[in-house]
Image (spheres, rainbow, N blue to C red):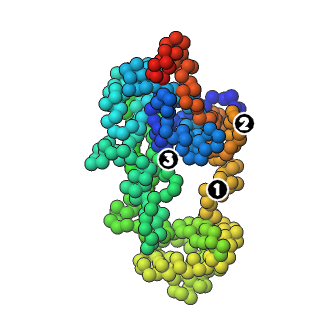
Amino acid sequence: MSDRPGPLTGVRAVTCSTAQAGTVPYMLMADLGAEVIKIEVPGKGDGSRTAGELIGDLSSFFETNNRGVKSVTLNLKSEEGRQILYKLVESADIFGQNFRPGAAEKNGYGYDDLKKINPAIVYVSVSGYGTRGPDAQLPGTDAVGQALAGIAEAYSIPEQPMRTGVVSVADESCAFLTFGGLLAALYCAKTTGVGQKVETSLVGSTVRLMGWTLTTTMWRNRNPITGARFNGTPERPGVAAAFNDRDEKPLVLQLGHQDWRRAMEALGFWGTLEERGISDLGLALTCDEKRDQILGTLRELFAGDSRERWVPILRQADIVAAPINTLLESSNDANVLANGYVAEKAYPNGQTLKVHGSPWQFSETPAKIGVAPKLGEHNDAVLTEAGYSKEQIADFAKRGII
């Protein structure tokens, strides 16, 4: 099974991408069998090679975002370095970059430059804010995507200041949408012979992540209720909310109007809600005071026992419910492990470490987890395949071209 080709076997990507949003799309391609050539600065490489948790010469950040790719060093400020890049682009299907807007064009490897070399090239560009608008030329990071797209409000608590999260959701959202966009453009190029430029951004991707809640906010022209997710109408309300148990361990439940009474009766909460005049969930959508009273009562009642008791009761009543994991708990969750979402990887240095598995399960063309390359590890192999001699490659290295 391990020798079967991945679904993207035969596809070649050349990338000048760093950080997370710019590298994860190509790491996903590599997992699925594509050949990905990562261009790095000679002697220095991607700055994230030493980011995150370091175990020996392994970086949790670099390994997560660059596994399975090939590393080739090129001095793209030199004419010879650019010519080598052009040579690699000739046989590539995809070129990716996430430089500050305008930098690639200024330095000779913008879309207009590369499509002259390869008209079928899919040129992928990732930016912070998008290529239009007053801040288009500014550099962007995950924090920018989270801040401008409104995700801080999505997890905010009433009466407390909003803040961005510890997980790079803007970077990852952008990476996933970039991956989908480049595959769509690749399909078009393969069927028509015509390449194109695909642009994504941290802000645009995180706006998309806000989904129907953003649409509802725009239609209502007011900010959503925070602290819990209420939806529907007063006549047909729904809610998704989190509560702490007696040990301060959180759980989540989500239900629609038809589930409300059944859930509360199963938990033994219905009588208390009726006594307090708040058994109608729809009140939460019409009265802030009643909403706070409903949530406050539920917080009080859930704090009366453990989530190990509450979650099975809700599930037995056919209500969606689950414990809320910390990141560490998530990495050990039975569902996560059983589906291979987290896996163990043996490294050449003899270490075995837990890493991301694959979010996909292909029945015929399975994904394969690779390891991140050493800086310039594939210089000789890639440049030899491109037609350069051993003498030329040695000369390039001597003069700092690679």
Question: Which residue position holds label 2?
Answer: 350
SS state under label 1: helix
Where residue 51 sits in the image (x, y, percent)? 54, 44
SS state under label 3: helix
The extreme left residue here reads 134
Residue at horizontal 50 percent and vertical 81 percent from the top: 293
Q: Quadrant of residue 332?
A: bottom right
Cβ atoms at labels 1 and 3 below 8 Å apart: no
What's the amino acid at mark 1? Leu
Disc marking residue 328: 1
Which of the two discs, 2 and 1, labels the residue nearer the N terminus?
Answer: 1
Alpha carbons under labels 1 and 3: distance apart: 19 Å
Question: Which residue position holds label 3?
Answer: 172
Whether residue 123 sits left or right of residue 318 in the image: it is left
Q: Quadrant of residue 265?
A: bottom right
Whether residue 92 appears in this view of the structure is no
Cβ atoms at labels 2 and 3 below 8 Å apart: no
Q: Nearer the viewer, residue 162 or 209?
A: 162
Cβ atoms at labels 2 and 1 below 8 Å apart: no
Residue at horizontal 64 percent and vertical 43 percent from the top: 55
What's the amino acid at mark 3? Glu
Q: Residues within 10 Å of mark 1 (few under 14, many from 20)?
A: few
Of tags 1 and 3, the one toward the viewer is: 1
Which of the two discs, 2 and 3, labels the residue nearer the N terminus?
Answer: 3
Where residue 24 sits in the image (x, y, percent)? 51, 40
Residue at horizontal 49 percent and vertical 51 percent from the top: 168
Alpha carbons under labels 2 and 3: distance apart: 30 Å
Whether residue 176 sits left or right of residue 9 in the image: it is left
